[in-house]
């Protein structure tokens, strides 16, 4: 039973590693869901590993065969190392995805600000000009200058 569980765990570890490596196409809408899914899969792996470790420790406690004990202990060390490596890769992947999500959000915020600014300028430009006096021309020139400066500041 221990051997079967050990083999199954190793198979699950390889599948998880493949899942981490192969999902390089980012659909921004589904990134959070993917992140939750791989975290859940990893937690399942940890649970399976813990059960396998417990069974291995029981066998070692009951066994008098030193070779069997050394083999099981070696397998458990190997499984722990593999899981630690996958944990590191998972953390790297989570950081990568979080950075992508953060930058996408920054982009959308910037885009929203630009669109708002453009709408404001369109509204300003849609107003009819009434230039019948020199003072009105100066005021209009000043207003246009202010609007251009605010637009330049918003786009920088």
Image (spheres, rainbow, N blue to C red):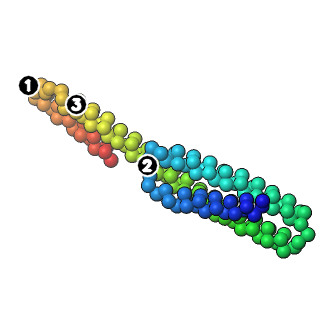
- Whole-percent x and y of residue 10? 67, 63
Q: Nearer the viewer, mark 2 or mark 3?
A: 2
Q: Is residue 60 visible?
A: yes
Q: Estimate the x, y position of residue 55 in percent, counting from the top left.
A: 81, 58
Mark positioned earlier in the residue sequence (1 or 3):
3
Q: Check the image and name the residue furthest to the bottom.
A: 67
| Residue 81, horizontal then vertical, whole percent | 69, 65
User: At 84% across and 69% down in the image, what residue appears?
Assistant: 69
Q: How many marks?
A: 3
Q: Secondary structure at mark 1?
A: loop
Disc on the earlier residue, 1 or 2: 2
Query: Which element is circle 3 on?
Result: helix
Numbered badge on residue 132: 1
The residue lying toward the viewer, choosing from 146 and 111, is 111
Q: Decide: is 4 above or below 108.
A: below
The mark nearer the N terminus, 2 or 3, is 2
Gap in angstroms between the C-alphas marked 1 and 2:
56 Å
Secondary-structure class at tag 2: loop
Mark 3, Cα crowd under 10 Å, few <14 / some 14-19 / many 20+, is few
| In this picture, residue 46 sits left or right of residue 110 | right
Give whichever of 15, 101 is nearer the camera. Answer: 15
Mark 2: few/some/many CA within 10 Å (<14, 14-19, 20+): few
- The residue to which callout 3 is attached is 124
Q: Which residue is mark 2?
A: 27
| Pointers 2 and 3 in contact (C-beta within 8 Å) | no
Q: CA distance from mark 2 to mark 3?
A: 38 Å
């Amino acid at each position: 039973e221990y051997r079967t569980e050990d083999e199954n765990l190793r198979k699950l570890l390889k599948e998880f590693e493949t899942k981490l490596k192969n999902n390089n196409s980012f659909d921004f809408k589904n990134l959070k869901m993917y992140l939750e899914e791989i975290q859940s899969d990893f937690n399942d792996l940890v649970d399976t590993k813990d059960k396998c470790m417990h069974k291995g420790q029981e066998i070692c406690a009951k066994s008098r065969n030193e070779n069997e004990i050394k083999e099981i202990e070696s397998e458990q060390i190997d499984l722990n190392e593999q899981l630690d490596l996958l944990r590191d890769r998972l953390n790297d992947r989570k950081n990568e995805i979080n950075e992508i999500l953060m930058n996408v959000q920054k982009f959308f915020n910037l885009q929203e600000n630009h669109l708002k600014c453009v709408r404001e300028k369109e509204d300003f430009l849609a107003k009819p000009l009434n230039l019948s006096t020199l003072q009105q021309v100066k005021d209009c020139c000043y207003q246009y200058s202010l609007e251009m400066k605010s637009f330049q500041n918003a786009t920088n």
